[in-house]
Amino acid sequence: MAITKNIKCPNCGVFNTNRDYCKNCNTLISFEKKQEQKVAAFKQEEIKKAQHKIENPNLAERLKKHKFWLFRIFGWILYSAYLLISAIGALVAWFVAMVAAG
Ligand SMILES: [Zn+2]
């Protein structure tokens, strides 16, 4: 036996039995369907963000692949600077931890 679901359409007030869309005005009234669409939209957004990241790598990555060698060198310098900064950051964090522990 199937469960009967009576959903009142929020748009026109007509009661619908076991329907995802209102029989009168075609508004989406199924709660599950709404959730599904929300999740799908969220996933789509995440995929878009990931694609954007892949298509737009950071400046250093772009410069490293530049046609002009001077830009490539600049890209590598920038890349080294990034690495150096994160290395210094790690060192400082380690130092702070040592001092705090000492
Ligand atoms: Zn309706």
Image (tube, grey):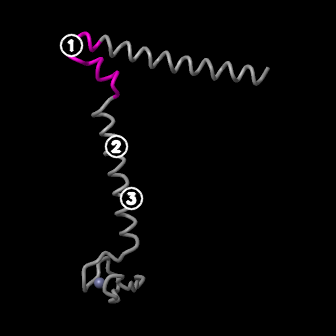
Residue ID for mark 2 = 49
Find out whether the residues at labels 2 and 3 contact each other: C-beta distance under 8 Å. Answer: no
Query: Is residue 62 part of the magenta span, yes or no?
Result: yes
Who's the residue at 62% across and 20% down the image?
92
Seen in the picture, residue 64 relative to 1 is either above or below; the reply is: above
Please provide percent x and percent y for residue 75. Answer: 33, 16
Q: Give me the C-alpha separation between circle 2 and circle 1.
A: 29 Å
Quick one: SS at disc 1? loop
- Residue at image mark 1: 68
- The amino acid at mark 3 is Val
Q: Residues within 10 Å of mark 1 (few under 14, many from 20)?
A: few
Label whose residue precedes the other's in the sequence (2 or 1): 2
The amino acid type of the residue labelled 1 equals: Phe
Number of residues whose C-alpha sits closer than 10 Å to that of mark 2, classed few (under 14), some (14–19) or many (20 or more): few
Relative to residue 11, is residue 38 depicted above or below? above
Magenta region: 58-72
Q: Which of 54 and 73 is in front in this view?
A: 73
- Residue behind label 2 places its C-beta within 8 angstroms of ligand 1: no
Instruction: Single out the mark in the foreground, 2 or 1.
Output: 1
Q: Distance between the residues labelled 1 and 3?
A: 44 Å
User: Residue 29: where, in percent of width, then height?
Assistant: 35, 77
Q: Residue at x 35, y 86 (%)?
A: 17
Badge number at residue 55: none
Q: Callout 2, which amino acid?
A: Lys
Q: In this view, does 69 lie above or below 92?
A: above
**Which is more N-terminal, label 3 or label 1?**
3
Quadrant containing ligand 1? bottom left
Residue shown at the point (40%, 70%) measured from the top left: 32
